[in-house]
């Protein structure tokens, strides 16, 4: 054994470092963070796990990784044993049992950590996959984040339909045509926020309903344990007693036919009993792959709605809301506009940028100015996939020519306005992947022919007018730096 590893706390900390490098942060927090080392005898390290469930799941899913970590830290003679608290029949005392490693197939669980369900006629005892202590159905923890509510979910054209459908569900869960509600979008656009908001509002309107939020990865882990312990029926029954099930990132069930089979039966039960399902994904039901066709068809039974990249006005609202929630009320409007024009990819990127700016301002006691925002955004964007937006292009072009942005969207035929409008279309075609029709829609609802004419016109001016060529080169440099 290594000299530095005499203390069992040090040994376990070294093991955790190895484990953490090889699994996701969510798996680490779920399965290893609750474990604590309790002793060391010769070459045997003893760790205490919360329940037999933990012991069996770790042995069944992470044993090879755990064995590698133990051998690397303690040497080839290193061994591991578990200490597991066992509730006594009196309910107010606990004892412990000690198990060596790799006994998952021979030792039966002696503590199911049951959840007591208040039925209309009787109390039933069903194992809870969340491993909560024995509680009544009405007290099942919803796993909802109270900070992700409708009050701070900023509405815009990009999310109005999804938000309205979610709010309607919260007012009448299981009784609307939006069952299931299937919300899809790219990352960072608010799927998880909206899912939590629906759950929180439902609980506020109907405190007696049992609402549960769960990520699909956790659902898969629970099913895996249920299959190992031959308790799939209990697993399904647990989910059937809920009133509203919100399952996030359903795409993780792809290419997992057995888990899909179980979810298929849960889905059917919810639909038959008018229980509410809310599902999120990074793809629409039409685009998602690795799922059985019968399950995909059910995803389309209710409403499928997407969340899009927030437009400029929505981004302005989001930034103001984030700053206000962080206690920043007195800030130059130019800073807010700069952020709204500069960061366009998703809401998460906006949040990250604001946090960076606030941290820099607070640590260095600097006032939040456009210059500070530019410094931080430049660093932030270096590590973030960035896309120049039509909004940003329009602002840069208008600032260069000292023309108000709003004039681009008027029917004005003044030469200077037309030139700025055409220049904006020209750079939008150069720096974005949008079609001519999409560019026209963002430049005053012009058609694709107008955009094509504008691009050709600017190209001719570059070839024949040195002053315009110099101006456009200067604008191009500004856009490239962004």
Image: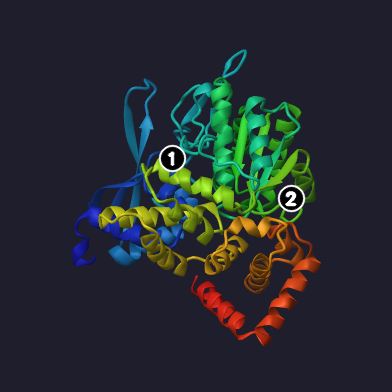
Disc 1 crowd rating (10 Å Cα; few below 14, some 14-19, many 20+) is many
Residue ranking furthest to the front: 414
Residue at numbered disc 2: 285
**Residue located 64% across and 52% down the image:** 308
Disc 2 crowd rating (10 Å Cα; few below 14, some 14-19, many 20+) is many
**Residue located 65% across and 71% down the image:** 423
Q: On residue 52, which mark appears? A: 1
Could you tell me which quadrant the N terminus lies in?
bottom left
* Marked residue nearer the N-terminal end (1 or 2): 1
**Picture layout, residue 430 above or below residue 343:** below
The local secondary structure at tag 2 comes to: loop
| Residue 228 appearing in the image | no
In the rendered image, which quarter is residue 346 located in? bottom right
**Picture layout, residue 251 above or below residue 136:** below
Closer-to-camera residue (462/39): 462
Closer-to-camera residue (417/450): 417
Closer-to-camera residue (250/447): 447
Distance from Cα at disc 1 to Cα at disc 2: 38 Å
Q: Position of residue 447 (x, y in %)?
A: 79, 62
Q: Position of residue 431 (x, y in %)?
A: 62, 72
**Picture layout, residue 342 above or below residue 208:** below
* Residue 387 appears left or right of 458: left
Q: In the rendered picture of this protein, how many numbered marks are placed on residues?
A: 2
Q: Are marks 1 and 2 in contact (CB under 8 Å)?
A: no
Q: On residue 313, which mark appears? A: none
Q: Position of residue 167 (x, y in %)?
A: 63, 32
| Residue 244 appearing in the image | yes
Closer-to-camera residue (287/423): 423
Q: Position of residue 448 (x, y in %)?
A: 79, 66
In the rendered image, which quarter is residue 406 located in? bottom right
**Residue located 67% across and 56% down the image:** 409
Closer to the eye: label 1 or 2: 2
């Amino acid at each position: 054994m290594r000299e530095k590893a005499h203390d069992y706390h040090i040994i376990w900390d070294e093991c955790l470092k190895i484990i953490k490098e090889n699994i996701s942060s969510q798996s680490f927090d779920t399965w290893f963070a609750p474990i604590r080392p309790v002793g060391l005898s010769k070459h045997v390290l003893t760790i205490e796990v919360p329940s037999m469930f933990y012991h069996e799941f770790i042995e069944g899913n992470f044993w090879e990784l755990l064995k590698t970590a133990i051998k690397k830290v303690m040497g080839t003679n290193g061994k591991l044993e578990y200490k597991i608290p066992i509730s006594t029949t009196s309910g107010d005392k606990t004892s412990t049992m000690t198990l060596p490693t790799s006994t998952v197939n021979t030792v039966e669980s002696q503590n199911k950590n049951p959840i007591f369900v208040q039925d209309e006629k009787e109390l039933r005892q069903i194992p809870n996959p969340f491993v909560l202590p024995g509680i009544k159905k009405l007290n099942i923890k919803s796993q909802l984040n109270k900070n992700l509510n409708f009050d701070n979910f900023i509405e815009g054209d990009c999310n109005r339909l999804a938000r309205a459908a979610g709010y309607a569900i919260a007012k009448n869960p299981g009784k609307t045509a939006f069952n299931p509600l299937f919300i899809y979008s790219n990352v960072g656009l608010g799927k998880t926020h909206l899912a939590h908001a629906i759950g929180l509002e439902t609980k506020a309107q109907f405190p007696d309903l049992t609402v549960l939020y769960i990520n699909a990865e956790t659902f898969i882990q629970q099913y895996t344990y249920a299959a190992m312990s031959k308790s799939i029926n209990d697993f399904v029954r647990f989910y059937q007693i809920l009133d509203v099930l919100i399952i996030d990132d359903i795409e993780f069930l792809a290419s997992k036919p057995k888990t899909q089979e179980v979810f298929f039966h849960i889905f059917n039960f919810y639909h038959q009993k008018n229980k509410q399902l809310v599902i999120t994904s990074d793809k629409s039901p039409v685009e998602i792959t690795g799922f059985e066709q019968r399950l995909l068809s059910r995803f389309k039974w209710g409403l499928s709605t997407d969340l899009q990249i927030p437009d400029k006005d929505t981004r302005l609202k989001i930034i103001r809301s984030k700053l206000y929630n962080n206690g920043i009320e007195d800030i130059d409007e130019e800073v807010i506009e700069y952020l709204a024009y500069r960061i366009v990819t998703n809401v998460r990127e906006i949040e990250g940028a604001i946090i960076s700016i606030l941290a820099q301002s607070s640590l260095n006691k600097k006032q939040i100015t456009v210059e500070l925002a530019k410094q931080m955004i430049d660093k932030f964007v270096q590590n973030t996939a960035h896309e120049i937006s039509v909004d940003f292009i329009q602002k840069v072009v208008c600032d260069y020519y000292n023309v108000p942005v709003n004039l681009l969207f008027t029917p004005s035929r003044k030469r200077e306005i037309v030139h700025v409008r055409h220049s904006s279309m020209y750079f939008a075609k150069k720096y974005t992947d949008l079609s001519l029709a999409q560019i026209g829609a963002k430049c005053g609802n012009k058609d694709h022919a107008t955009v094509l004419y504008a691009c050709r016109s600017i190209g001719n001016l570059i070839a024949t007018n040195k002053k315009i060529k110099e101006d456009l080169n200067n604008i191009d440099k500004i856009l490239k730096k962004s």
